[in-house]
């Protein structure tokens, strides 16, 4: 990986930490970082030793948004040719659970990056927001769609149209984050959850993620059909017998 993205593997626990590392610009997303991030997620998804991914930044910033130095003179055709949809898509399509550990700034593309995760652990000092409108732009990484689905039209409109940020506590209250903890506990909590997921039944976890995300883009009847098919297929998984037998025996299951 490039120096802008660090993979800190913890294979004994089945967890890998994917860390944005451009501290001089608060982990701002330039094209090289976006490409490296997509490549790293693809690599970790293909690694059978990795069962859960923690996406992290630094103490001051998870990700402060786009690197505006690359945008000042950019023309429309150049932006089209960057194919940002493919780079974001590598994260959105990851079959393994992704936990975002958000400390400090998560603004613009940084907020959108957090929304690509499955679970978001926010620090009390975190700042989530979509300030693109303040520089005459709009979100381009999915916020008009993902934020609205997460928090509803009226809260989303307020954040998108004013560009004003919210705290980690406010983010949890509105449904933009899963849990808020003290800043110094963010990564430890994210690793704790990732470890729990890494020890869990992998096929069931994958199917749950697929049903939730896939169902968000389907009518209710089709989403329910997707859920039923996945539920039925899990009866072929050895994890089903392991889990049920352990519950009947009143012991903790050990999934392979």
Image (tube, helix red, strand yellow):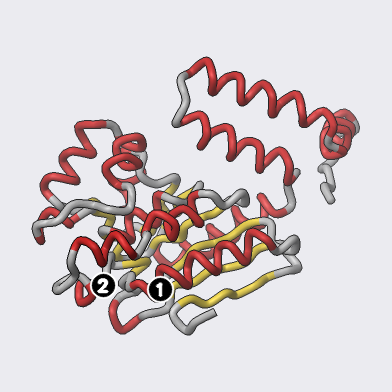
Q: Position of residue 119 (x, y in %)?
A: 49, 48
Residue in the picture at 44% in, 79% down? 4
Q: Position of residue 34 (x, y in %)?
A: 40, 68
Relative to 155, 40 lies left or right: right
The picture places residue 234, in percent across and down from the top left corner, at 77, 31
Residue drawn at (75%, 43%), measured in percent from left and top?
201
Q: Secondary structure at mark 2?
A: loop
Q: CA distance from mark 2 to mark 1?
A: 10 Å
Please tell me which residue lies in front, 60 or 212: 212
Q: Would you say 12 lies left or right of 134 here?
A: right
Q: Which residue is mark 2?
A: 67
Q: Reading the chain from its start, which is encountered first: label 2 or label 1?
A: 1
Q: Is residue 60 visible?
A: no
Q: Secondary structure at mark 1?
A: helix
Residue with the mark numbered 1: 33
Question: Is residue 134 in view?
Answer: yes
**Circle 2 Cα neighbour tier, 10 Å, few/some/many (<14 / 14–19 / ≥20):** some
Tell me whether the residue at label 2 lies in contact with that at label 1, contact meaning CB atoms closer than 8 angstroms: yes
Q: Check the image and report above or below for 106 versus 93.
A: below
- Residue at the outermost top position: 221
For the N terminus, give its image quadrant. bottom right
Q: Quadrant of residue 62?
A: bottom left
């Amino acid at each position: 990986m490039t120096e802008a993205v660090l993979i800190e593997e913890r294979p004994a626990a089945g967890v890998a930490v994917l860390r944005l590392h451009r501290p001089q610009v608060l982990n701002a997303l330039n094209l090289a970082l976006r490409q490296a991030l997509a490549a790293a997620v693809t690599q970790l998804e293909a690694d059978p030793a990795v069962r859960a991914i923690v996406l992290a930044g630094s103490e001051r910033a998870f990700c402060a948004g786009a690197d505006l130095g690359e945008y000042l003179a950019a023309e429309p055709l150049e932006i089209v040719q960057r194919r940002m949809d493919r780079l974001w898509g590598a994260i959105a399509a990851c079959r393994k659970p992704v936990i975002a550990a958000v400390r400090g700034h998560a603004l613009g593309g940084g907020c959108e990056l957090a929304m690509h995760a499955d679970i978001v652990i926010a620090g009390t000092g975190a700042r989530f927001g979509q300030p693109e409108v303040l520089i005459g732009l709009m979100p381009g990484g999915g916020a008009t769609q993902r934020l609205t689905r997460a928090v509803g039209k009226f809260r989303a409109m307020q954040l998108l149209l004013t560009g004003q940020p919210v705290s980690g506590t406010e983010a949890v209250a509105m449904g933009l984050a899963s849990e808020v903890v003290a800043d110094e506990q963010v990564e430890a909590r994210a690793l704790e959850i990732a470890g729990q997921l890494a020890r869990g039944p992998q096929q069931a976890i994958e199917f749950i993620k697929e049903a939730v995300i896939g169902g968000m883009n389907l009518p209710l009847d089709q989403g329910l059909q997707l859920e039923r098919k996945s539920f039925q297929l899990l009866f072929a998984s050895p994890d089903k017998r392991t889990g049920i037998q352990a519950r009947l025996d009143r012991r903790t299951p050990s999934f392979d």
